[in-house]
Image (cartoon, grey):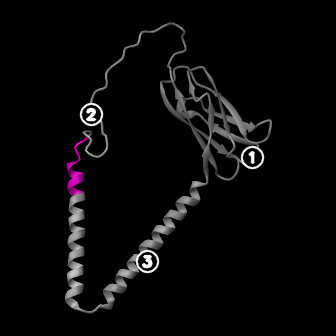
C-alpha cells in the first residue's frame, strides 16, 4: 500500500519542481524586453516617426528595425538629457494601412524594446475621397454562450475529462474506504 503513495508523492514533487523551473526561466527572460515609444504612433506614408526608449541602460547607441514596413534599419543615439535613446525613420510611400512592429536592439546585453506603429492612410494626397460605410456582418463571440463558433468538440472533450476525473475520485475514495488501511 505504501508504494502507490510514494509513487504519487514522487510524481507530484517532480511536477511541482518542473513547473517552478519553467516559470522561473520565463520570468528571468521576461526582463530582456522593454518598450519603445513611437511619435506619432499613427502615421501616413512619407511621415517621419521618432522612436525613443529608456530600456537600453548605459548604452549610447542602439539599432532600430523598421523592416516590417520596408523602412529598413536606423540608429538611435543618446537623448540630450542622457536618460534614453532616440532615433527616426520615414514611413515609405506605398505602405499599406495596418499595424507594424518596430524593434530596438540595445548595443549590449541582448535587450530588445518593441513598439507598434499604426499606418492610417496609404496615400498622402490632400484630395477628398468618398468613403462608404458597411454594416457589421457575421457572428460575435461574446464569451459564455456566445454565438461565435461551434464549440461542440471542446464542450464534449471538457465534459468527458470532468466525468473521468470525478469517476477516478469516487473509485479512489471507495478503494481507500474498502481497504481500511493507508
Name the side, left or right, on which 111 lies relative to 165. Answer: right
Query: Which of the two discs, 1 and 3, labels the residue nearer the N terminus?
Result: 3
Whole-number angstrom distance, CA of label 2 to CA of label 3: 45 Å
Q: Residue furthest bottom?
A: 181
Residue at the spot 61% in from the left edge and 46% down from the top edge = 34
User: Callout 2: helix, strand or loop?
Assistant: loop
Q: How far from the left and from the top, in percent, is residue 4?
A: 31, 85
The local crowd at label 2, few if under 14, some if 14 to 19, many if 20 or more residues have their Cα within 10 Å, is few
Q: Is residue 149 above or below residue 14?
A: above
Q: Quadrant of the rendered structure where residue 16 is?
A: bottom left
Residue at the spot 30% in from the left edge and 35% down from the top edge = 140
| Magenta segment | 149-157
Q: Which numbered disc covers residue 13? A: 3
Provide the residue designation for mark 2: 139
Provide the residue designation for mark 1: 59
> Which label lies toward us, 1 or 3?
3
User: Callout 1: helix, strand or loop?
Assistant: loop
The local crowd at label 1, few if under 14, some if 14 to 19, many if 20 or more residues have their Cα within 10 Å, is some
Q: How far from the left and from the top, in percent, is residue 157?
A: 22, 57
Q: Is residue 147 above or below residue 26?
A: above
Amino acid at each position: 500500500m505504501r508504494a502507490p503513495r510514494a509513487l504519487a508523492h514522487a510524481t507530484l514533487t517532480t511536477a511541482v519542481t518542473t513547473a517552478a523551473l519553467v516559470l522561473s526561466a520565463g520570468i528571468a527572460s521576461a526582463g530582456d524586453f522593454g518598450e519603445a515609444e513611437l511619435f506619432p504612433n499613427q502615421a501616413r506614408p512619407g511621415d517621419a516617426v521618432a522612436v525613443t526608449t529608456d530600456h537600453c541602460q548605459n548604452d549610447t547607441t542602439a539599432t532600430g528595425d523598421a523592416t516590417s514596413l520596408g523602412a529598413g534599419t536606423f540608429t538611435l543615439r543618446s537623448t540630450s538629457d542622457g536618460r534614453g535613446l532616440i532615433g527616426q525613420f520615414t514611413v515609405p510611400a506605398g505602405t499599406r494601412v495596418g499595424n507594424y512592429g518596430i524593434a530596438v536592439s540595445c548595443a549590449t546585453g541582448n535587450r530588445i524594446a518593441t513598439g507598434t506603429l499604426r499606418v492610417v492612410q496609404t496615400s498622402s494626397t490632400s484630395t477628398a475621397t468618398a468613403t462608404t460605410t458597411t454594416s457589421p456582418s457575421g457572428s460575435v463571440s461574446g464569451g459564455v454562450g456566445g454565438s461565435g463558433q461551434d464549440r461542440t468538440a471542446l464542450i464534449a472533450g471538457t465534459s468527458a475529462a470532468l466525468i473521468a476525473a470525478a469517476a477516478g475520485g469516487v473509485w479512489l475514495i471507495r478503494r481507500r474506504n474498502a481497504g481500511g488501511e493507508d
